Amino acid sequence: MKPLILILLLLISNKITSQSQNVDDLIKNIFSNLISDNGTSIQFEYNYEKSSHQIESPIKGHISLFSDNRFFVEFKRNEMNIIQLYDGSSLFTILVDDQEIQIDNIDGNSQFIINNILQEYQNNYQRTIIIDNKNFTTIKFTPKKNEYENVYNDCIDLLELPVCLKLPRQCRIGIDSLNQNKLNDCISNSKQKNTNIDFIEINIDKKSQQIKSIKQLDQFNGHATIEIISMKEADENLLKIDKPEYDNFEIIDFRNEN
């Protein structure tokens, strides 16, 4: 969900078609509009395909973004109907088909906090406008791979693992699960997250002043596409679970266990 929320933050800015803005100014405007507006609701379709796998039909979804990091996300497909929302105090995961609601806390460092997502992409991604003509603007997000490689290679040294495991050219001796977990922890503690994303491109229609599509290519040659269906003002009632349709749902509260 995290990459999706970050990508869809770009839908909030009504200044997105200005040719004079650089990308960093654009991101600042996005966040400013996010916390000052009443919220934005976006209907979309998500598709993913690669040589070994393809979604049979696009997954329909809806995301609403509000101030104070609040959000509502819903995905619908034949075998899955999941809602996730954060009301500013607790995270709710609603498994509609199982009639179950899970409630949990999230702390200030959580990956679900929109501020943190935005900050991560500002720090760890290069942003460039690659197309800017009278009809469309395309913004490209590319991970700062060299920074990740430095952290990865430093962790190889710190854990005294074989030097040939270093990036970018790794030997094929492999790594056992115990050392892999240690390596993952080392990378995580360095606050430099691993990513399998090659790039993300956002295509914006200047006439309608709306994003038309979002494309993501991963390192496994997988192509994810988000097609924007509609946008409108959001409804804060989405952030409430005291509704008749949830009366018979089982409540599982994890908040006291953390």
Image: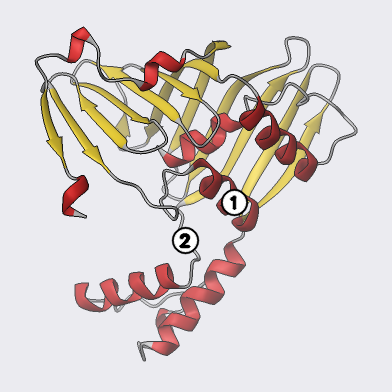
Q: Is residue 198 visible?
A: no
What residue occupies the far right of the structure in this picture?
20
Q: Say which element carries label 2.
A: loop
Vertical relation: 106 (above or below) 66: below
Alpha carbon distance from label 1 to label 2:
12 Å
From the top left corner, tell me how far across and down residue 220 is, in percent: 41, 48
- Res. 45 image quadrant: top left
Which of these two is toward me, 189 or 164? Answer: 189
Vertical relation: 153 (above or below) 184: below
Vertical relation: 199 (above or below) 162: above
Which of these two is toward me, 10 or 215? Answer: 10
- In this picture the colour scheme is secondary structure
The tag on residue 197 is: none
Disc 1 packing (10 Å; few <14; some 14–19; many ≥20): few
User: Where does label 2 land, which residue?
Assistant: 193
Total numbered badges shown on the rendered structure: 2
Which of these two is toward me, 256 or 127? Answer: 256
Residue at the (33%, 22%) spot, across then down: 75
Which of these two is toward me, 173 or 31? Answer: 31
From the top left corner, tell me how far across and down residue 26 is, in percent: 76, 37
From the top left corner, tell me how far across and down residue 249 is, in percent: 11, 20
User: Where does label 1 land, which residue?
Assistant: 119
Residue at the (78%, 16%) spot, across then down: 206
From the top left corner, tell me how far across and down residue 18 is, in percent: 85, 26
- Res. 27 image quadrant: top right
Residue at the (29%, 77%) spot, across then down: 182
Disc 2 packing (10 Å; few <14; some 14–19; many ≥20): some
Q: Say which element carries label 1.
A: helix
Q: Identify the amino acid type marked 1.
A: Gln
Q: Identify the amino acid type marked 2.
A: Lys
Which part of the image, by quadrant, shows the C terminus? Answer: bottom left
